[in-house]
Image: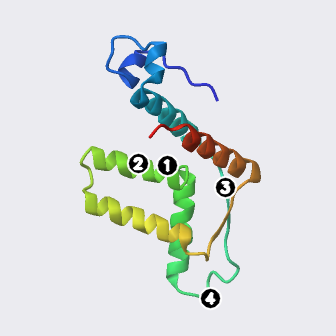
Amino acid sequence: MKKKFKKNPHKRFTSNKELLVGDLFVKETYNRILSDWRGSYFEVLKKNKIKIPSNLFDGDVQNLNEILMLLGIESIGGKYELESQIRFAQKNNSIDKVKAHRFRKKVNSIYDNGRIIIEYHDLVKELDDKIDEVYYQNIVY
């Protein structure tokens, strides 16, 4: 993946008039660049297989609702994309803190219930893990 900062990268990462090599040694600037790199990677849409249980209609309608919600979430880019949209809506005051919390809780419950299996491609999972590993090893606290 290639990402270019065409216009005013200094405004994005530092308060100086220019982005200089010395700015990379400033903790906040370095962390912003690293976070932006990680965020750009996770914005890439990755398709995952959803394994629908064979006993879908044995239970209640809630099973079907959860599967349909999961299919919808995966179609827009998955859990990470939905969480970033929730954060964006919260920053723009479209939703308040309580609603954002409820949305996140619902999304987490759908992904963590264990009835629906999402099959992640091994290479994508490995790359996701490597991106997180590099990010957390290099972030400056």
* Residue 123 position in % (x across, y down): 75, 48
* Disc 3 from disc 2: Cα separation: 19 Å
- Would you place residue 64 above or below residue 71 in this image? below
Examine the image and state in which quarter residue 64 appears. bottom right
Residue under circle 4? 58
**Drawn side of residue 85 relative to residue 77, left or right:** left
* Disc 4 from disc 3: Cα separation: 25 Å
Residue under circle 3? 48
* Residue 60 position in % (x across, y down): 53, 86
Residue under circle 1? 81
Task: Please give the label number shown on residue 85.
Answer: 2
Q: Of 17 and 99, which appears nearest the observer?
A: 17
- Would you place residue 2 above or below residue 134 in this image? above
How packed mark 2 is, by other alpha carbons closer than 10 Å (few <14, some 14-19, many 20 or more), is few
Task: Please give the label number shown on residue 125.
Answer: none
Kind of residue at disc 1: Glu
Q: Are marks 3 and 2 in contact (CB under 8 Å)?
A: no
Kind of residue at disc 3: Asn
Quarter of the image that includes the C terminus: top left
Q: Earlier in the sequence, mark 4 or mark 3?
A: 3
Label 2 residue SS: helix
**Drawn side of residue 18 relative to residue 112, left or right:** left
User: Which mark lies nearer to you, 4 or 1?
Assistant: 1
